[in-house]
């Protein structure tokens, strides 16, 4: 088995977090803009900084969605990363930051 890919994601504010969060994934997930090629099912390690927090979080995940180069509209090339079972706490932290906004979200970079 190969070593998972390591990605870094800095989320400076709540509107950006709302635009990259994937709440329809049961363990939570994030869209990560990237030009690197990934395949569905690839293991990744995501190191991220959430808005207003000083410590980086490390999440193990799996690629479950791909937005390819040349994608049309407002979309950007990147991947959707589904968090691992051990990372429910990260999903909970994100959803606490987004409390009351998930149903009223504006444009998203995800599906």
Image (tube, rainbow, N blue to C red):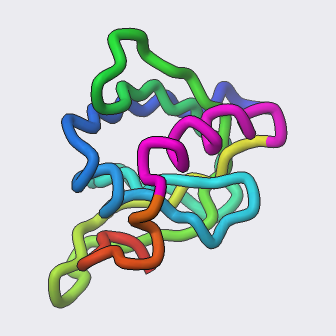
**Residue nearer the viewer, 86 or 64:** 86
Residue located 76% across and 42% down the image: 84
**Could you say where residue 34 lies in the image, as x and y percent from the top left?**
30, 51
**Could you say where residue 86 lies in the image, as x and y percent from the top left?**
81, 32
Residue located 57% across and 30% down the image: 45
**Could you say where residue 23 lies in the image, as x and y percent from the top left?**
57, 65
Screen quadrant of the C terminus: bottom left
Q: Is residue 21 left or right of residue 105?
A: right
**Could you say where residue 26 lies in the image, as x and y percent from the top left?**
75, 62
Residue located 46% across and 25% down the image: 47
Residue 93 within the magenta-colored segment of the rendering: yes
Residue 68 within the magenta-colored segment of the rendering: no
Screen quadrant of the N terminus: top right
Q: Is residue 47 left or right of residue 78?
A: right
Q: Is residue 89 above or below residue 100?
A: above
Q: Report the number of numbered marks.
A: 0
Q: Is residue 66 above or below residue 74?
A: above
Residue located 42% across and 33% down the image: 7
Q: Is residue 5 left or right of residue 19?
A: right
Q: Is residue 63 left or right of residue 33?
A: right
**Residue nearer the viewer, 21 or 61:** 21
Q: Which residue range is magenta in the image?
A: 85-99
**Residue nearer the viewer, 77 or 30:** 30
Secondary structure of the magenta portion, mostly?
A: helix
List the single residue furthest toward the bottom. Answer: 73
List the single residue furthest toward the front. Answer: 100
Instruction: Specify the quadrant of the image occupied by residue 108.
Output: bottom left
């Amino acid at each position: 088995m190969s070593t998972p890919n390591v990605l870094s994601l800095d989320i400076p504010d709540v509107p950006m977090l709302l635009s990259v969060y994937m709440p329809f994934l049961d363990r939570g997930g994030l869209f990560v803009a990237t030009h690197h090629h990934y395949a569905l099912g690839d293991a990744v390690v995501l190191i991220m900084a959430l808005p207003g927090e000083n410590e980086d979080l490390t999440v193990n995940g799996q690629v479950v969605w791909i937005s390819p180069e040349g994608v049309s509209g407002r979309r950007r090339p990147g991947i959707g990363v589904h968090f691992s079972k051990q990372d429910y706490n990260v999903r909970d932290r994100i959803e606490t930051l987004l409390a009351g906004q998930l149903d009223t979200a504006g444009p998203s970079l995800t599906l």
